Amino acid sequence: GAFWLALSSVFALMASITFHSPGFLADCAWLTYGRVHPAAANALVYGFCIPASLGVALWLLARLGRVPLAQPWLVAVGAKLWHIGVLVGLLGILGGDATGFEWLEMPRYAAVILFAAFLLMALWGFVTFQRRQEWALFPSHWFVLAALFWFPWIYSTANLLLLVFPVRGVVQSSIDWWFAGNLLVVWLSLAGLGATFYFLPQLSGRPLQSHYLALFTFWTLILFGTWSGIPAGAALPAWM
């Protein structure tokens, strides 16, 4: 994850330089702005944010359940497979094989690898939760378990409707915006809040102020965060 974070920074810097020097690396098609910019964004989200969040989520499930992580070697295989998928996807973007959908630029063959890798890691996260010895549920459990379910759902739905059985017209954009809102607003918030609700009480030495407010936060994010991806100026009905 740290490697992809550093690489995304390099790509983002290269994309930024092209605004001031349009001739910068213009002779190399692989490094033009239209390819480097999505490569930077995908390396950041898929290469760093999601693996880092998954690592913390699996650690929390084992920690809160007071049980070792189920099949850690299979989780490690899933992690390696995920990074292979990120590598294949970034090479596809830089090679000109991007899908053209924002935050879904990785080609379909890379998406299949990422989906299988996430399922492999999430499956053993659910098994770890089922084997827990501490049966009391903490607020972190709600957010982490929802995050493990949320990504495969939105990622498979968006890829099926945009790449496998493509819908037509402006519906494509609405689905892409729906996915972007769920990924950047809902999924990253679920993973981040799950860690926050664990670490803040631990670091402060004080119990969580209110489980009911945490539950209110959870359901508010689930019910309303998913509608936040479509921009105000989109060519769609105003109610959407």
Image (cartoon, grey):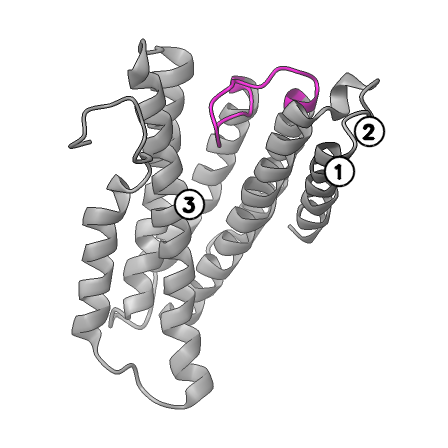
Q: Residue at x 75, y 21 (%)?
A: 30
Mark closest to the chain's N terminus, 1 or 3: 1
Task: Name the image quarter holding the C terminus.
Answer: top left
Mark closest to the chain's N terminus, 2 or 3: 2
User: Residue 9's spot in the image, x, y percent?
Assistant: 70, 47
Is disc 1 in contact with disc 2, using a CB cutoff of under 8 Å? yes
Q: In the picture shown, does residue 165 fall above or below 76?
A: above
Amino acid at dot 1: Ile
Number of callouts in the render?
A: 3
Q: In the picture shown, does residue 206 fall above or below 232?
A: below
SS under mark 2: loop
Which disc is residue 24 wearing?
2
Whether residue 82 can be seen here: no
Amino acid at dot 3: Leu
Residue receiving disc 3: 184
SS under mark 3: helix
Viewer-proximal residue among 138 and 38: 38
SS under mark 1: helix
Is disc 2 in contact with disc 3, using a CB cutoff of under 8 Å? no
Quarter assignment of residue 4:
top right
User: Residue 145's spot in the image, x, y percent?
Assistant: 32, 54
Amino acid at dot 2: Phe
Q: In the picture shown, does residue 48 fall above or below 153?
A: below
Q: Main secondary structure of the magenta part?
A: loop
- The residue segment tinted magenta is 92-108
Q: What is the C-alpha distance between the residues marked 1 and 3? A: 26 Å
Q: Residue at x 19, y 65 (%)?
A: 215
Mark closest to the chain's N terminus, 1 or 2: 1
Residue receiving disc 1: 17
- Residue that lies at the very extreme toward the bottom in this rendered image: 205
